[in-house]
Amino acid sequence: MEPANSVSVFVSENPGGVLASHPVEGEFPEAAWVNLAVTGSGTVVFGTDRRSRKALNIGSRPEVSLVVVSGTGQEIQLEAVARVLGGDAAEHAADALATAHPEGGGDPDYLCVVGLEPRWMRWVDLSTVPPTMEEHTL
């Protein structure tokens, strides 16, 4: 399986992770849990309040890191470029999020949907002996 496809499959099966972004001010990165989904075109997306630290950080500097774990020893680490989606892309992303997280939501007046364009990934599987680790530039 192609690395980019494996990201989409893994996130679909494990639709949540920790996103780290560069702060607008200050020297420490900001990390936050995000509910994830994958669109029909394979884009990994999440929703957030456009007033949130992560949204402001992404607006200032779009390079982010994301870690998604399975709970059974596998994880994907991503470095990606994040962008706020608009138009049809935002609608498709919002639909994917609503399907993956029907309990989700947020204030529609402030909701923005963010898409990730992975540039690098690391796959780790601690359930194998020896543990597996692969890195790919995407």
Image (cartoon, rainbow, N blue to C red):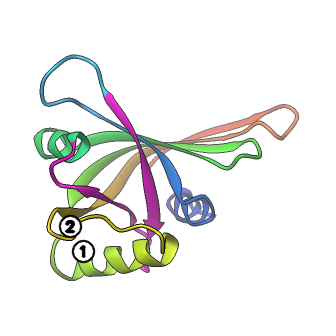
Q: What element carries label 2?
A: loop
The reply to whether residue 39 is in sight is: no
Relative to 52, 77 lies left or right: right
Residue 99 drawn at (x, y percent): 48, 78
Residue 112 drawn at (x, y percent): 21, 63
Magenta-drawn stretch contains 99: no
Q: Residues within 10 Å of mark 1 (few under 14, many from 20)?
A: some
Between 121 and 59, the one lying in front of the other is: 59
Q: Main secondary structure of the magenta part?
A: strand
Q: Residues within 10 Å of mark 2 (few under 14, many from 20)?
A: some
Question: Which residue range is magenta in the image?
Answer: 30-52
- Whole-angstrom CA distance, mark 2 to mark 1, is 5 Å
The reply to whether residue 111 is in sight is: yes
Residue appearing at x 21%, y 56% in the figure: 83
Residue 18 drawn at (x, y percent): 46, 41
Residue sitting farthest toward the top: 27
Quarter of the view holding residue 10: bottom right
Residue 85 marker: 2
Q: Earlier in the sequence, mark 2 or mark 1?
A: 2
Name the residue beneath numbered marker 1: 90
Q: Is mark 1 on a helix, strand or loop?
A: helix
The amino acid marked with disc number 2 is Leu
Residue appearing at x 33%, y 74% in the figure: 93
